[in-house]
Image (cartoon, rainbow, N blue to C red):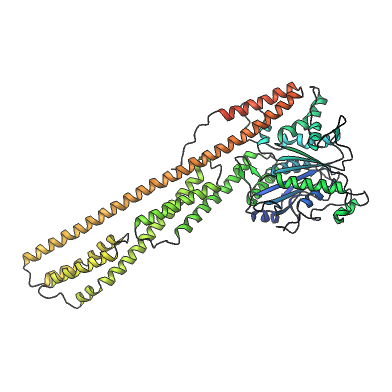
Amino acid sequence: MATKKIMPAPICLIENSSSGQLTVNQKALAILSGISQPVVVVAIVGLYRTGKSYLMNRLAGQKKGFSLGSTVQSHTKGIWMWCVPHPTEKNLTLVLLDTEGLGDVEKEDPKNDSWIFALAVLLSSMFVYNSMGTINQPAMDQLHYVSELTEHIRSKTVPSLDGVDDSAGFVSFFPDFVWTVRDFNLELKLDGHPITEEEYLENALKLKRGTDEKTKLFNLPRTCIRQFFPTKKCFVFAPPATWKELPKLEDLQENELQPEFVEQTGRFCSYIFQNAKVKTIQGGIVINGPRLESLVVTYVETISSGTVPCMENAVSALAEIENSAAVQKALDCYEKLMSPVKFSTNTLQELLDLHTASEGKAIEVFMQHSFKDEDQKYQRELRNHLLAKWDDFFKQNEKESTKRCMTLLQNIFKPLDEAMKNGTFSRPGGYHHFLQKKQKLKEKYEQESKKEPWAEETLVKYLQSMEDKAETILQVDQSLSEKEKMIEVEKAKSESAMQAAKQLQEMQEKSQQLLEQTEKSHQEHVKQLIKKMEEEKQHMLAEQEKALNLKLKEHTQIIREGLQNEAKQLENQILSLQKQIHTPRPSSPCTIL
C-alpha cells in the first residue's frame, strides 16, 4: 500500500492557537497551490485518543506520519494535512485531513470543536467519524456536533422563500459519511441474527416515535446524519493489540497486530480508495489543489470574522479567483497560438482565419476553467482583452507588411532612382522613357507583392512621393509642347486618382472583412456561452435530482418506521425540491456586448 509521497510528512493546515483563534498555515497553502490534479479529500474527526491518526497513516500507506500519541493528552492540534498520490487513480491526489481530538478537557474554548467539525465537513469529500466501543446513546450524545452544523454552516446567502430550512440543501454538497467504531468487542447480531456493519449502523440511526423533548434530543443527531450525508457506511474494528502494546502501535509489525484488526483495516482502506469521490462544490465544480486552498482561506477567514461559513458565498469567492485566472489562461492560449506565425501571414484573410481559430480556442479554454460568471462579467473582460490583442496584432501586421513592401519598393525602384539622380531622363523624350520604366517596375512590384496585405497602400504612398520628380522630368522634356505637357499632367492626375480609388476599394474590402470578423467573434462567444449555460443547468438539475432521490429514500424509511410528523416535515423539503426541478428557469440574457 506504500505510495510515493508528494509530502514527506504531514503539515499543519489550520492552526488552533491556545486562545482559540484559527489561522491558516501559509506553507500548507503553498503545497496545495502546486497540486494541479483533482483532489480526493478524506477527513477524520472524533474524540481525542481514539486512534484517528493511525487510520490516516494507513491511508497514506505509512506506519508513521500523523502523530499518534500515547498519553491521555490530545496530540493533534487544529487540522493537519498530508497529500499523497492516490494509490489506485494516477490522475488524482489524495488529501488526508487529521483533526484534533474533540472533547479535549485542556481546550479553553469548547466551541472550537464545533468549528473543527464543520471545517472537516466542508473541506472533505469523505468524512470519517471515529469512536470507541459501540454505537450507543452515549456515542450519539458525543456526536452532538452534527446537530450543531445548522448553526455553523449555511448553504445559501438568502433564506428560501418557501420557508424550507436552509439545511435541506446540505445533502447536495456534504461529503459521504463513514463511521468507524474502534475496539468493538460485540458480535454483530440483532435479535439473535447476524447483521452487516451497514445494518448495524442503520439500526443505530433508527428514530423513536414521540414529540416530547427527550425523544427529540434522541432523534436529532440521527436525523441529521440521515438527512445531511448522501451515503453512510460503517466499519467496526477489533482492538489492534493488547493494552500494553497500544502505546507503541506504530512500531508494531503487521504480524504483531490482531489478524482481525489487520483485515478490517485493509477493508476500510480499500473502501476509501475505491469510493471516496473527487471533491466538488455546487455546480459540479471539480476541486484541485489551488481551489481547495481558496476554500480553506475563505472558510477560516469567515469563521475568524465571527460569521457563519456559507457554501454559496464560498463558491462565489472561489469563482472570482478562478474566473480571473481563466481570463489569463485564455489570453495566454490566444497569444501562444498567434505567436508562431505572428507576422508572416501573406493576406489579411489568413490573419483573420488564424485569429478566428485562436480566439475560438481561447474562449473554449475560458469556458473550461470558469464557472458562475454572473452576468458574463469575466467573459466580457476576456472579449475586451481579445479585441485589444487582435488590434495590436492587426496594427503590427500592418506595420510589418508596410515595412516589407517599402523595402521591396526601394529595391525594385532603385535603378529608377539612380537614373533620375544621374539625369538620364533630363533629355528630349525622357518623360515617356521615365513612364515606361516606372510602369515596368510597378508591374514587377505588383507581381512580387501580390500576397502582401498592405501592398497597394504602400505603393500609392510611394508613387505619390515620386510625383514632384516626375513633374520636373516632364517640364524639362523639350520634345513636348506645352499642350502635350498639360495633357500628360492631366493623365498623371487621372492615374493617381485611379490608383487612389483602387486603394479606397481595397480599404473598404478590408473594413468589410473586419466587420464580418467582429460578428463572427460575437457569435462564437454567444455559442460557447449558451453551451456553458446548458452544461451548468444540467449539473444543477443533476444535483437537485440526487438530493430529491435521497430525500425520497429517507421519506420511505421514515414512513416505514411509522414517524408521521417527521415524514410531513420531510415532505415540505421534497415538494420544494420538486418545484425547483420542474419550474422552468428564465433564460439569462447573453450580455457579452
Residue at x 88% of width, y 37% of height = 187
In this view, the residue in front, 20 or 364, is 364
Q: The N terminus lies in which quarter of the figure?
A: bottom right
Q: The C terminus lies in which quarter of the figure?
A: top left
Q: Residue furthest front?
A: 193
Q: Is residue 163 visible?
A: no
Residue at x 29% of width, y 54% of height = 507
Residue 225 is drawn in which quadrant?
top right
User: Where is residue 564 shown, x and y percent of the image?
Assistant: 74, 21
Work out whether 455 lies above or below 362. Answer: below
Would you say 140 lies left or right of 355 here? right
Would you say 443 lies left or right of 172 here? left
User: Where is residue 72 shown, x and y percent of the image?
Assistant: 89, 48
User: Where is residue 32 shown, x and y percent of the image?
Assistant: 67, 53
User: Where is residue 290 shown, x and y percent of the image?
Assistant: 63, 51
Residue 545 is drawn in which quadrant?
top right
In this view, the residue in front, 409 or 551, is 551
In this view, the residue in front, 376 or 248, is 248
Q: Is residue 232 visible?
A: yes
Q: Residue furthest bottom?
A: 422
